Amino acid sequence: MTADQFFNLFHQYGMILVCAVVFCEYMNLPGFPAGVIMPAIGVLIAQSELSLVLTITLSVVFGIGGSLVIYGLCYWGGEPIMEKLFGKSEKFRSFVRRCHEYIDAQHGRGLALCRIIPVLRTIVSIPAGLIRMPLRWFVGWSALGIAVWNTALISCGYFFGDKILSMF
């Protein structure tokens, strides 16, 4: 999909497209890098009549929704699903172990911190589901981290979009 096609879709569907893209990004689907998507959303919002506050709020809600899909798969499917997806990769198992230890040591706060670290931010739903983190902790700490990350990136695009676009 070209940038022009994306802009045309945005102008046609607006907030529905934003919500769908954020949902897919938090499900860790390939092709949806937050470092590009979130500022682009901010740029598009600045050029439209849509609300920045509403956009950020919906991005957090749909970010939690996408994260809950991964969390739920791991919570109820556990190891069998992980083995189907990642095989018996020792690298992945080591990663899950380290995330589990970090989240456990921080009593959930580690989840919020992981939400603002590139790459970890979407993958952290996997160990949280595997360790069966209580749902209210998962949603609460995820919401905090997602709100910080999305607000920073979307606002950056919103407030500095003209400068970003002038570079191209």
Image: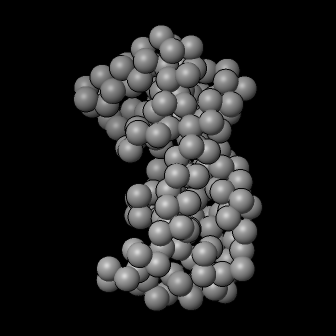
Q: In percent of the image, x 66 and y 86: which residue is there?
A: 12
Q: Is residue 165 left or right of residue 130?
A: left
Give the residue at the far top of this rendering: 105
- Above-or-below relation of 61 to 99: below
Colour treatment of the image: one colour
Relative to the observer, which residue lies in front, 93 or 56?
56
- Above-or-below relation of 46 to 63: below
Relative to the observer, which residue lies in front, 140 or 30?
140
- Above-or-below relation of 64 to 94: below
Q: In percent of the image, x 43 and y 18: which residue is there?
A: 102
Kindly tell me whether residue 62 is visible in this rendering: no
Kindly tell me whether residue 70 is visible in this rendering: yes
Please give the count of numbered marks on the rendered protein.
0
Q: In percent of the image, x 56 and y 14: which residue is there?
A: 107
Q: Quadrant of residue 123?
A: top left
Quadrant of the image containing the N terminus: bottom left
Image location (x, y in percent) of residue 20: 62, 64
Q: In percent of the image, x 38 and y 44: which residue is there?
A: 118
Q: Is residue 98 left or right of residue 21?
A: left
Image location (x, y in percent) of residue 122: 47, 43
Image location (x, y in percent) of residue 98: 36, 20
Image location (x, y in percent) of residue 156: 49, 61
Quadrant of the image containing the C terminus: bottom left
